[in-house]
Image (tube, rainbow, N blue to C red):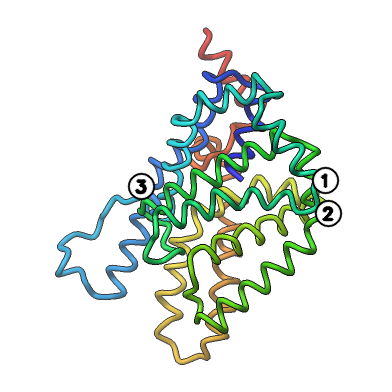
Amino acid sequence: ISGMGVCFAMKRRDWKSLLKDRAQRILIPFIFGVFCICPISTYIAIKYYGTWGEIGVFYVPNPGHLWFLFNIFSYVVLLLPLLCYLKNRPDNKVCHFLSKTFRHPAGLYILSVPFVVEALLIRPEYFEAYAYSSHGFWLGMVCFLVGFVVVHLGEIFWCAVQRLRLVALGLAFSLYLTRLLVFSMDGPHVLTAFESMNWMLAILGYGSLYLNRPSASLTYLSEAVYPVYIVHMPVQFFFSYYLMPTNIPAVAKLILLLGATLGTSLLLYEFIVKRVKWARPLFGMKLPSHFAYTFKIAGAR
């Protein structure tokens, strides 16, 4: 998704504007999160597990659940020459080859090759251990670049992924059940990588078919999803702190925790992040157009 976003952004920006925009949208929230959001989660965890004496401090700046933001910005910087090349030469050999391949019924599965290669080369102990790992970094880079390329190809990709959506969904479920029933969830990484690709193709296929239309709800949620993700973890830890020790059934705890986390995160977004102008950039949101214009004029003066 991040690679797709960068591809859309590059259509109306040069490389300097792109770096400035990504720094504002990614680096600022990351730095703010390291010092002001993630330490809240750490504080609650230390308090819950009673490890204060062992650590000796209660304020611990850390990337927490925002670790991948730094990775995304790194991808933009490291891959910028390649991204500019792809943008300026849309008829390059790679894109021409993929355009022809995607017209084949199973052509999209060529995208699974780099995922499988990454699993074979990195050989992580646990495939799902993305955070703070070389596996997470390289797999993230593969996802980022694939996202950029498929959006760069445009309708050729979207038509292909819509045609393949049902097959991809069926394969994803089948591979998941195989991993669950045969391997107790810890199957070969190659199998998990291929399964992951099918989930992504299925989601993108159904999403492009049913969500690619004007919608006030989708517009609202698209704007809210990033700030809600940033604030959700300390909110989740807060409610977990009080819910986990209770004797209510585990399923009820899960439902209450999910509802409380989502509801509170949306309320924080709606009534604080969205409405407090100086807070918006800290959560990756743009300033309101009228405020940005006034700020720009004041700066020019």
Residue 239 at x, y percent in the picture: 46, 72
Mark number, residue 34: 3
Contact (Cβ within 8 Å) of mark 1 with mark 3? no
Crowding at mark 1 (Cα within 10 Å: few <14, some 14-19, many 20+): some
Q: Amino acid at mark 2?
A: Arg
In the rendered image, which residue does mark 2 sit on?
163
Measure the alpha-carbon separation of dots 1 and 3: 40 Å
Which one is in front, 181 or 9? Answer: 181
Residue 32 at x, y percent in the picture: 40, 42
- Residue 98 relative to residue 180: left or right: right
Q: Amino acid at mark 3?
A: Val
- Residue 52 relative to residue 207: left or right: left
Q: Earlier in the sequence, mark 2 or mark 3?
A: 3
| SS at badge 3 | helix
Measure the alpha-carbon separation of dots 1 and 2: 6 Å
Q: Earlier in the sequence, mark 1 or mark 3?
A: 3
Crowding at mark 2 (Cα within 10 Å: few <14, some 14-19, many 20+): some
Residue 166 at x, y percent in the picture: 80, 63
Q: What residue lies at 44% left-to-right and 47% top-to-bottom?
A: 138
Measure the alpha-carbon separation of dots 2 and 3: 42 Å
Contact (Cβ within 8 Å) of mark 1 with mark 2? yes
Which one is in front, 63 or 170? Answer: 170
- Residue 138 relative to residue 225: left or right: left
User: Up-down: is 13 above or below 224?
Assistant: above
| SS at badge 2 | helix
| SS at badge 1 | helix
Q: What residue lies at 57% left-to-right and 22% top-to-bottom?
A: 84
In the rendered image, which residue does mark 1 sit on?
159
The quarter of the picture where residue 286 lies is top right
Q: What residue lies at 33% left-to-right and 55% top-to-bottom?
A: 39
User: Up-down: is 56 above or below 48?
Assistant: above
The quarter of the picture where residue 202 lies is bottom right
